[in-house]
Image (cartoon, rainbow, N blue to C red):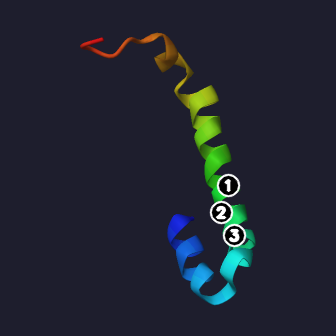
Amino acid sequence: GAILSTVLCTYFGVHALFGALPILIYAFFRLLHADLVNEKSLFSRVPRGH
């Protein structure tokens, strides 16, 4: 998403964000789903050294 935003900014200026926004929203919801469903059991685990 960030690379696409950078490339589009050179051509469309501020309006390039609207081109990359769907990709960024998709990535956000994939990460949110992974945290809430797939990796839910890892919330209670404390990292070593803390």
Q: Give neighbour class at mark 1: few <14, some 14-19, many 20+ (Cα, 10 Å).
A: few
- Residue under the image location 70 percent in, 54 percent down: 25
- Where 8 sits versus 29, above or below? below
Q: Earlier in the sequence, mark 2 or mark 3?
A: 3
- Residue under the image location 53 percent in, 65 percent down: 2
Quarter of the image for the N terminus: give it. Answer: bottom right
Callout 2 touching callout 1 (CB < 8 Å): yes
* Of marks 2 and 3, the one in the foreground: 3
Q: Give neighbour class at mark 3: few <14, some 14-19, many 20+ (Cα, 10 Å).
A: some
Q: What's the distance in space between the residues labelled 1 and 3, CA to CA? A: 14 Å
Instruction: Name the residue carrying label 1.
Output: 26
* Circle 3: residue type: Leu
Please provide percent x and percent y for residue 47. 33, 16
- Of the pair 41 and 50, the residue shown nearer to us: 50
Q: Earlier in the sequence, mark 1 or mark 3?
A: 3
- Where 23 sits versus 15, above or below? above
Q: Is residue 48 left or right of residue 36?
A: left
Q: SS for tag 2?
A: helix
Instruction: Name the residue carrying label 3.
Output: 17
* Circle 1: residue type: Tyr
Instruction: Name the residue carrying label 2.
Output: 23
Q: Give neighbour class at mark 2: few <14, some 14-19, many 20+ (Cα, 10 Å).
A: some
- Where 44 sits versus 3, above or below? above
- Residue under the image location 66 percent in, 69 percent down: 20
